[in-house]
Image (cartoon, rainbow, N blue to C red):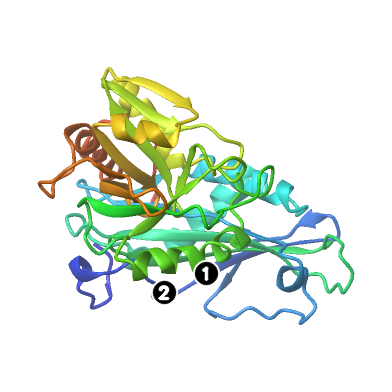
Amino acid sequence: MEKNQPDLNWEDLTFSYMPTDYNVRCTYRDGAWGPIEVSDSPEVNLSIAATCLHYGQESFEGLKAYRGKDGKVRIFRMEENAKRFIRSAEGTMMQPMPVELFCEMVRKVVKLNLRFVPPYGTGASLYIRPLEIGITARVGVKPATEYMVIMLVTPVGPYFKTGFKPMRVCISRDYDRVAPKGTGSIKVGGNYGASLVAGEKAHDLGYASLLYLDPKEKKYVDECGAANFFGVKDGTYVTPASPSILPSITNLSLRQLAEDMGLKVEQRHIPVEELSTFEEASACGTAAVCSPIAEIDDLDTGAKYVYTTTGEPGPVTTALYNKLRGIQWGEEPDEHGWCEILEED
């Protein structure tokens, strides 16, 4: 275990920002990425006319590092995050960061903050947040020529207060998450800013999240708040297919694990009426892995879709959650080579 470990109650951590020792930065200028720079400052010095502030040239990622059962630190599928980071940059006319440089920055920021990687058995992990911003001063709508990638880390607990317990979700057709053929498939801040009003309405009504329908026809299941959705029925794992859904790396992993367990996997349109046929339902993403759904209430039609009345998640969701978490914590064989074990100095 690291020396000078912070005096934290690791088991009680929430999913919130906590300052750590260092962040790392890399700037694209004059047609090339510069060296990785280490900073102990939580501040960014920006022009008041930077394109990230005015024209939304911004994207981000989220991934985690885990202190495993064997004491080693594992970083989960960072190459997939690097690829998605490139797609988000391309979608906002920013300079894509090469996969190798992205991964080098991830390794460096984790190593610099090793004392903040929560101990094994606490249920907490080190959340890694890369972001890219346009930093050129512009008052006309035009892409920047200079960009900065920053990576910060913070130790986190469960995303939802209830942890791995079924939650209540609602449907409302008054809100769209994104526009058809818009930015839904890339990870940009504007998608999340646009979701805050709907999210708060759901919370005010006592729900953990809002299940969006497709923005064009309002006929098909889209995303569950900021997470992907999947349902289980008849030995099949079903998740929506749509150009407006963010491709979740957690969902990608769960689909593979479902196949490994002998389930059939379908990625297709899910009509809202099909919600009544699922035996289990869940949201999934980096922050929570799986967030089982107890019931979905359609606020517009009055329909109620109930998946558990016992307060416990279903068996397939539980098995998938335990398997994926087991791989991340070094408790299960990493048969697909998803984790990189960090070489500690």
Residue 28's image quarter? bottom right
Residue shown at 52% from the left, 69% from the top: 23
Q: CA distance from mark 2 to mark 1?
A: 8 Å
Q: Which residue is mark 1?
A: 23
Residue shown at 22% from the left, 31% from the top: 316
Q: Could you tell me which quadrant the N terminus lies in?
A: bottom left
Between residue 62 and residue 339, name the one nearer to us: 62
Task: Examine the rendered structure and indicate whether residue 332 appears above or below residue 126.
Answer: above
Q: Is residue 36 left or right of residue 57?
A: left
| Residue type for callout 2 | Thr
From this viewpoint, is residue 69 visible? yes
Q: Which residue is mark 2?
A: 20
Circle 2/circle 1 CB separation < 8 Å = yes
Between residue 285 and residue 335, name the one nearer to us: 285
The residue most toward the left is 310
Q: Could you tell me which quadrant the C terminus lies in?
A: bottom left
Between residue 178 and residue 100, name the one nearer to us: 178
Task: Examine the rendered structure and indicate whether residue 242 appears above or below residue 96.
Answer: above
Residue shown at 68% from the left, 48% from the top: 182
From this viewpoint, is residue 327 visible? no
Instruction: Tell me where residue 338 appears, x and y as whole percent.
Output: 40, 35
